[in-house]
Amino acid sequence: MNSKLRGTICGIAAAVCYGTNPLGAMNLYADGLTANSTLFYRFGIAAIILGLMMAVQRKSFALTCRELGTLAVLGVLMGSSSSSLYFSFNYMDVGIASTLLFVYPVMVAVIMAVFFREKVTAATVASIVLSLAGIALLNQTSDGAALSAWGVTLVMISSLTYAVYIVVVNKSSLRLSSIKLTFYVLLFGVLTIFGLTLAMGEMVQPLATPREWLFAFQLAVLPTVLSLVLMVVAVHDIGSTPTAIMGALEPMTAVAIGVLLFGEKFTANLALGIVLILAAVLLIIGGKEMSPHKITMVIGRLGRQLKKTWRWKS
């Protein structure tokens, strides 16, 4: 398997796994656990799993001072991003928070262009536009209520710290395996969460039932271990911006969970949003071979389809 194909598959899989985040979090919230306690178990269990994997494979845990410093920064970024997102769930619907979070590919593209002079191609711009349009359609709010300013601020902080995390992974001189890198990121991440918990005058709440342990393990395995390991592989193989844009599949996964597991209605908005997101992902995969004129034609066709759908809905 060539590196581009492997990176693409890993990027898609990482996004889908990360999209399962609210499933465990909201069920633990319903049982009375706080955001800090939920994250503590998510990161802690995940770090234990990866540590055991490294021990079984007899992998070295040794680090240089430079590697230790970089991994500590990555752990703080990941812990801060996750904490901000989880706290935002207390101020707005999970679906809305997930849609707002997707501004991070734009942030990644801007950071790479401004600080690292990465060329912004027509395919990249078009895929970002299509992705954001699709995400907007996945927003199922219908009462017109204003979003919480504090909730929006928390999601923006989460987006920015996650964008910086992706860029640091891509531009750092780390030459660690994805499992070793993720293990230390989670280790420093759980220390960050524990510090935030103490600073807020809280204590880590115990998991009291098998159901709570089940959802804690779900959070540790799918949106944490698998998602982060696969994302590291994708970033190294295809770069920061394409990996971030493939994250459009994250809220799409959340929609699928809502429809299939919680009986939420599948609307025309959802259908069109999914089409736009898939178009964005396909565009970022093969967009380098497409001319700006061809990209414009594709967007024009999607725009005409959008108008037809709006007339059909009305």
Image: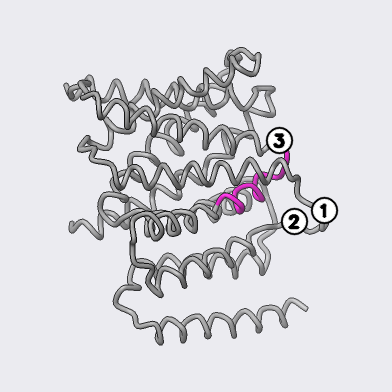
Q: Where is the C terminus found, in terms of image quarters? A: bottom right
Q: Is residue 185 left or right of residue 53?
A: right
Q: Identify the residue at horizontal 49%, vertical 31% (top origin).
A: 79
Cα distance, mark 3 to mark 1? 16 Å
Q: Is residue 215 left or right of residue 309?
A: left
Tell me which label, 3 or 2, sits earlier in the chain: 3
Q: Is residue 142 left or right of residue 223?
A: right
Residue that mark 2 sits on: 141
Mark 2: amino acid: Thr
Residue that mark 1 sits on: 145
Front-most of 261 and 87?
87
Tell me which label, 3 or 1, sits earlier in the chain: 3
Measured as percent of width and height from the top left, residue 28 is found at 62, 27
Between circles 2 and 1, the one closer to the viewer is 1
User: What's drawn in magenta, residue-wise?
Assistant: 90-101
Q: Identify the residue at horizontal 28%, vertical 42% (top origin).
A: 172
Residue that mark 3 sits on: 90
Between circles 3 and 2, the one closer to the viewer is 3
Q: Residues within 10 Å of mark 2 (few under 14, many from 20)?
A: few
Measured as percent of width and height from the top left, residue 67 is found at 26, 29
Q: Is residue 279 above or below residue 187?
A: below
User: Which of the 4 quarters of the picture holds residue 69?
Assistant: top left
Q: Where is the N terminus found, in terms of image quarters? A: bottom left
